[in-house]
Amino acid sequence: MTSPEQSLDMSEDDTLPERPVRGAERLVSLDFIRGVAVLGILFANITAFAHPMLAYSWPDALPGGATLADDAIWLFQFVFIDGKFRALFSLLFGAGMMLFMERVWARGGSRWLQARRLFLLMLFGLAHFYLLFVGDILFLYSIAGLLVLPMLCWSAERQFWSGLVWYLLGALILTGLLAMPAVIEAHPAAAPDQWQTMMAGWQDRIDEAARETSVMQQGSYGDIVAFRFAEQSGQLAELLIVVLFETAPLMVLGMALYRRGFFMAPLDSSQRLLWSVVALIGGVLLSLPLGLWAIETGFPPFLTQFLFNGPSAFPRLAVSLGMAGLLTLWAPVCARSWLGSRVIAAGRMAFSNYVGTSALMLLIFQGWAGGLYGDLHRMALLPIVLLGWIAMLGWSKSWLTTFRYGPLEWLWRCLAYGKAFNIKR
């Protein structure tokens, strides 16, 4: 017997090479992990919603500097949150690309459809960046997806080792590039000219953050959008470093993991459980001293940037893979629970939820709306994270009882396939 959703999906012509994935074809584990990831992304981004992006990694950019509570929450985020859920999304994006193309190829289609979808995602990302949130990742994913598109045809083994080595080399390069400024910061007398140049550059970043705060607190919505076009467009180019050294290799790794059955819970889960726990705990134990180093030295700016973006990338991969392994094991059980079913619904609507939370946070923080921008420290931001979680878990399940897709998922499908699909069940 088919479910109502399966019956509805089967009304579409199965012989068409270009048709959306049916509900019956979805992997529950991918939706569950994606739901957890979109919740975690809000926790990671909340400081950047409420303050200039500089405060995301450097607590002293908060008003009046960091408090003890700020330090503690920063450390928790550094160890468990920052970069981990972005990495999960990257792995899932690669797995989703592979899953999508397997089904397109089986129906006689080509990678052209995937390229169209990625180009449209790029446009969505640009709109999100300029109109809602400068911390956008959709543009980043679209560029990375186009970059790795030819690698969909590689063998699973080649994808796995290429993605893993690429990621580790990228982390090593970033660590090396960021190490020298941290060394000069520790011994400024050894290189006075370089130190002066570095401090001038850092002061420029502080001044830019102050201008951003002023516009976000006092400007109209139009002023904020104009500021982003005039002052912050360069951040899109900076994202290319993340694309090259992190997002693209993780997508390739995600392709390989999907093809190797990583996102399917094994019948004998004891081995999967063991290595997932070892990876998670090992990554945490390696991340913790890096975070404590930054706190104990009072968050020197260049050392903090080094620790946040350099060596932390190595344990970040272990934590992310450990999380993915555990969530895959828990997905079938959680799917039957009240909360788990709502997490899965949030994952099925991750695109709408990601952009929707940006709109909600805009209304809470920007000066012309809620007016909380630049006021709240990290502890006071936690209830707002909880509010966003409640909103996502609440509306996603309700929406999907009436509609087949989230609103942005539906729009993306219609534009990609060039036809209007029925959104209602």
Image: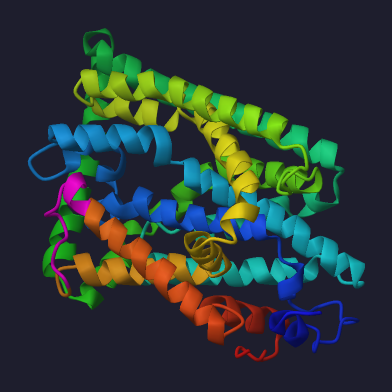
Colour treatment of the image: rainbow
18 sits to left or right of 198 = right
Q: Nearer the viewer, residue 270 or 101?
A: 270
Is 375 contained in the magenta span?
yes
Image spot of residue 203 (x, y percent): 19, 37
Q: Residue at x 10, y 45 (%)?
A: 63
Please tell me whether the stretch drawn in magenta is mainly helix, strand or loop.
Answer: loop
Give the residue at the far left of this rendering. Answer: 64
Image spot of residue 54 (x, y percent): 27, 44
Q: Quadrant of the N terminus?
A: bottom right
331 sits to left or right of 261 = left
Image spot of residue 341 (x, y percent): 54, 65
Q: Nearer the viewer, residue 286 or 188?
A: 286
Above or below for 219 versus 257: below
Q: Residue at x 65, y 41 (%)?
A: 249
Above or below for 321 versus 210: above
129 sits to left or right of 48 = right
The range drawn in magenta is 370-381
Image spot of residue 302 (x, y percent): 30, 26
